[in-house]
Image (spheres, rainbow, N blue to C red):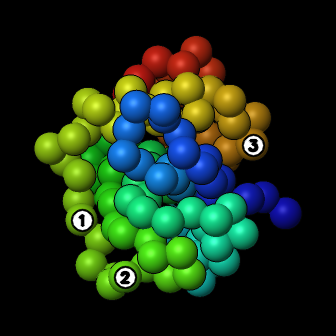
Amino acid sequence: MRNIFLVEGHPSESCEISALVLAADIESPLEHLHDVEKKLTEFNIHGLVVFDLLVSHGNKRNRFFSAFFNGSKFADHNFKSEQNSYSTYSQLSAPHLKNHSKEINHILLSSAMKYAIKEGIPL
């Protein structure tokens, strides 16, 4: 069975982000929040969590969302679109997508996107 999402705890030393949740299949991790919360709790995550939905959306529009995780659940389910931080989050996400490129379903991605992920190029 494929992973629906992957969690990277503390994805950057210089960032206030506590975790990065990467979509790994065509289903969005936002559709499986209970499972995401369970995994974040296992990793002792507390703070800002950023979701990268590139793989589940198949395009770059509305790709990044964020929410505050209180250690056991999301404080509210009002996830914030992060269009203004696109460049920053794209840079942050690129090496993690590269590290997991064999674990993600590439079916919705163009050839150029697949290549960028494989090479760690920010999209």
- Image quarter where the C terminus lies is top left
Q: Is residue 57 visible?
A: no
Disc 1 target residue: 80
- In the picture, measured across the screen, residue 96 lies left or right of residue 92, that is right
* Foreground label between 2 and 3: 2
| 1 w.r.t. 73: above or below | above
Say what secondary structure mark 1 lies in: strand
User: Nearer the N terminus, badge 2 or badge 3?
Assistant: 2
Q: Residue at x 54, y 45 (%)?
A: 10
Say what secondary structure mark 3 lies in: loop
The residues bearing labels 3 and 1 have C-alpha atoms spaced at a distance of: 27 Å
The residues bearing labels 1 and 2 have C-alpha atoms spaced at a distance of: 12 Å
Which mark, by number, is residue 75? Answer: 2
Q: Residue at x 66, y 46 (%)?
A: 105
* Foreground label between 3 and 1: 1
Report the amino acid beneath label 1. Answer: Lys
Cβ atoms under marks 1 and 2 closer than 8 Å: no
- In the picture, measured across the screen, residue 102 lies left or right of residue 97, that is right
- In the picture, measured across the screen, residue 43 lies left or right of residue 116, that is right
Which mark, by number, is residue 103? Answer: 3
Find residue 55 and report its horizontal and vertical position in percent.
Answer: 52, 48
Report the amino acid beneath label 2. Answer: Ala
Find residue 39 and report its horizontal and vertical position in percent.
Answer: 68, 69
Q: Nearer the viewer, residue 99 or 14?
A: 14
Q: Is residue 49 visible?
A: yes
User: Nearer the N terminus, badge 1 or badge 2?
Assistant: 2
Find residue 101 and report its horizontal and vertical position in percent.
Answer: 68, 33
Query: Callout 2: 10 Å neighbours few (<14), some, many (20+)?
Result: few
Say what secondary structure mark 2 lies in: loop
Report the amino acid beneath label 3. Answer: Glu
| 71 w.r.t. 113: above or below | below
The residues bearing labels 2 and 3 have C-alpha atoms spaced at a distance of: 29 Å
